Structures are given as structure tokens and as C-alpha cells.
Image (tube, rainbow, N blue to C red):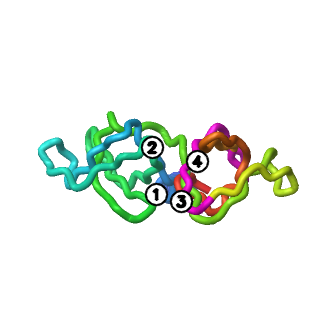
């Protein structure tokens, strides 16, 4: 009886954990077609023209991934056009710091909508690169990373 209870508990935990895990990807190229369906036969819905743009995976079918972007646009992209997430977008005004601390020297002010390339992340901070600046930002108000 105990074995059945433990098994049931494990299954519930595993299902709830896997359902809550967000998967973020980034665009591999400067021009990527987003399709209405998971097939090359499906019409092109729109085209992304921003390399490293972060996207959230919401479904998958064979070699296609259904994605949603920060503005809730969705569609299907072939896996050859995607890579593991390496970027985020600031959803609010942010400060780039020299070290992972709000008491560190500020380097730059980042505007809302700025694309940031992730070099490394810790618990509450990410080391990012944007334009000619490299530094640390806190994870608050970043789209494209699981909290």
C-alpha cells in the first residue's frame, strides 16, 4: 500500500513539475519564418528578423516547435531555426551593474525592450552583453528566462 502511495505521489509531483517548467529558445538566424501549422506545407504567418530573439516554447510536434513571443504572437518554427536560449528582453527600465549587486557601480541604463545576450546567470542576477556594454542585471522584469 505504501509503495502505491509513494508511486502516486511521485507521478503527481513529476507531472506538476514538468507542466510548470518553462522552455525558452532563441532564434538562430536573422530571418525566420513562423508558420500557421507544424509543417513546411503550412503558410507563413509572419517573419522574425532579429537573431537571438527569445521565444517561449508552448508545444512541439515532430521537428516543429510552437512558440509565443513577448507580445503573445504565436506560431510554428522548425527546430533548425532555433537554439537553446541565450537572450532575454528587459520589460522595464533596468540598470546594468559592474558586479551582481545593486550596490555595485552602475555601468548603463537599459531601456524597456532592450535585447540582452546572456553570458551567465546566478540565482538573482545575469551577466549580460548588449551593444558595447557588459555587466550584471537582476532577473526581475526580464522576459525569456525562468525565474
Mark 1–mark 3 distance (CA, rounded to whole Å)? 28 Å
Query: Which residue is at 66% across, 39% downward?
Result: 120
On the picture, is 72 further left or further right than 45?
right
Q: Is residue 24 part of the magenta span, yes or no?
A: no
**How packed is label 1: few (under 14 Cα within 10 Å), some, or many (20 or more)?**
few
* Dot 4: element: strand
Q: Residue at x 72, y 57 (%)?
A: 95
Callout 2 crowding tier (Cα within 10 Å): few <14, some 14–19, many ≥20? many
Describe residue 98's horizontal placement relative to residue 128 as left or right: right
Pointer 2: what residue? 26
Label located before the other in sequence (4 or 1):
1
| Between 122 and 28, the one nearer to me in the picture | 28
- Above or below, comparing residue 129 to residue 101 in the picture: above
Mark 3: secondary structure:
loop
**Quarter the C terminus occupies:** bottom right
Task: Return the mark for residue 19.
Answer: 1
Q: Secondary structure at mark 1?
A: helix
Q: How much space separates mark 4 and mark 3, taking CA atoms?
A: 9 Å
How far, Cα to Cα, is label 2 from label 3? 16 Å
Outermost residue to the right: 103
Of callouts 1 and 2, the N-terminal one: 1
The residue singled out by tag 3 in the image is: 113
The tag on residue 116 is 4
Give me the C-alpha separation between circle 4 and circle 2.
12 Å
Alpha carbons under labels 4 and 1: distance apart: 27 Å
Q: In this picture, which residue range is highlighted in magenta?
A: 111-126
- Of badges 2 and 3, the one in the foreground is 3
Determine whether label 4 and label 3 are within 8 Å by CB. Answer: no
Q: How far from the left and from the top, in percent, is residue 143? A: 54, 58
Residue drawn at x 15%, y 51% is 43
Whether tag 4 and tag 2 are in contact, CB under 8 A, the answer is: no
Amino acid at each position: 500500500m505504501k509503495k502505491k502511495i509513494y508511486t502516486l505521489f511521485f507521478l503527481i509531483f513529476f507531472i506538476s513539475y514538468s507542466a510548470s517548467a518553462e522552455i525558452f529558445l532563441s532564434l538562430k538566424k536573422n530571418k525566420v519564418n513562423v508558420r500557421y501549422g507544424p509543417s513546411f506545407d503550412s503558410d507563413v504567418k509572419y517573419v522574425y528578423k532579429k537573431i537571438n530573439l527569445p521565444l517561449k516554447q508552448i508545444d512541439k510536434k515532430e521537428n516543429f516547435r510552437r512558440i509565443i513571443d513577448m507580445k503573445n504572437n504565436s506560431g510554428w518554427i522548425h527546430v533548425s531555426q532555433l537554439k537553446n536560449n541565450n537572450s532575454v528582453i528587459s520589460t522595464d527600465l533596468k540598470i546594468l551593474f559592474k558586479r551582481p549587486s545593486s550596490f555595485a557601480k552602475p555601468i548603463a541604463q537599459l531601456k524597456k525592450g532592450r535585447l540582452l545576450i546572456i553570458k551567465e546567470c546566478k540565482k538573482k542576477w545575469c551577466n549580460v552583453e548588449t551593444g558595447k556594454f557588459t555587466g550584471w542585471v537582476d532577473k526581475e522584469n526580464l522576459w525569456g528566462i525562468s525565474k
